[in-house]
Amino acid sequence: MGLFDRVSRLVRSNVNDLVSKAEDPEKILEQSIADMQEDLLQMRQAVAKAIAAQQKIQQQNNLAQSEADKWHQRAQLALQKGDENLAREALGRKKVQSEAAVTLKAQLDQQSGMVDQLKRNLIALEGKISEAKTKKDMLKARAQAAKANEQLQGALSSMNTSSAMAAFERMEEKVLEMEARSTAALELGGVSLDQQFAALEAGGDVDDELAAMKAQMLGGSTTAGSLPAASTAPVTEVKDAAVDAELEALRRQLNDTK
């Protein structure tokens, strides 16, 4: 293989590769339909010309046949009048026109066959163009969908998803760590919630016991009230002092317990 052939093949392969990459399916489809429409226009023009030629040959054939018939009638007339020479001349003219009519009839048959074939080709081309238009719309939609999907995949591939997820997980761990530090600081800085509720529960028990003792004492003082009125005042004062003293002792005991 010569150097020129190798270089020529290399150049052609690179050109073909560039052309293939530069081809836009949507634009190529539109151009293909436009080319088909141009072919259809030329085909219609060819059919119109063929039909016009057919009609012209038909007219010429009809004229030749009419002339042949006319000279035949003249030959008959001349023969009836006894002029054989004139009749012979008329028959000669008839022969020329009849031969022309035969030739024109052959041309007419050939032209009619060509016109019929052109019409069939025209109908077939119109059907192909109609089918191509339908396929073009479908292919354009598929090409647009493929292009959109390709762009989406490119956008997704350009995103560093793994790095983003890792950062998200780090931030989640950081928030959990901050919450743990906040809870620890609360427990170290004061009484915990559990201790506060325990104190409230204990205080509630003491208050209940104190209320019960007060009720018991009030009941005892009512019983003593049945004595004469003159002696109740000093006794009540003594008992109130005793109650206050006992209440103070209970308070001190509660404080010591806490």
Image (cartoon, rainbow, N blue to C red):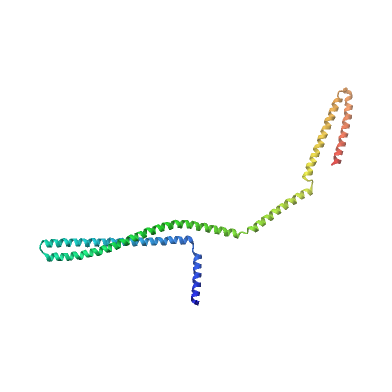
Residue furthest top as drawn: 228
Direction from residue 158 to residue 102 in the image, left or right: left
| Residue 182 horizontal/vertical position (percent) | 74, 50
Looking at the image, residue 24 lies above or below residue 219: below
Residue furthest bottom as drawn: 2
Locate residue 46: give its quadrant: bottom left
| Residue 215 horizontal/vertical position (percent) | 82, 30
Residue at 81% in and 38% down: 203
Direction from residue 43 to residue 80 in the image, left or right: left
Locate residue 67: give its quadrant: bottom left
| Residue 79 horizontal/vertical position (percent) | 12, 62
| Residue 187 horizontal/vertical position (percent) | 78, 48
In this orientation, which residue lies closer to the viewer: 235 or 85?
85
Residue at 41% in and 61% down: 36
Locate residue 195: give its quadrant: top right
Residue at 57% in and 58% down: 153
Looking at the image, residue 238 lies above or below residue 101: above
Residue at 81% in and 37% down: 205
Quadrant in the picture for the C terminus: top right
In this orientation, which residue lies closer to the viewer: 98 or 240?
98
Residue furthest left as drawn: 82
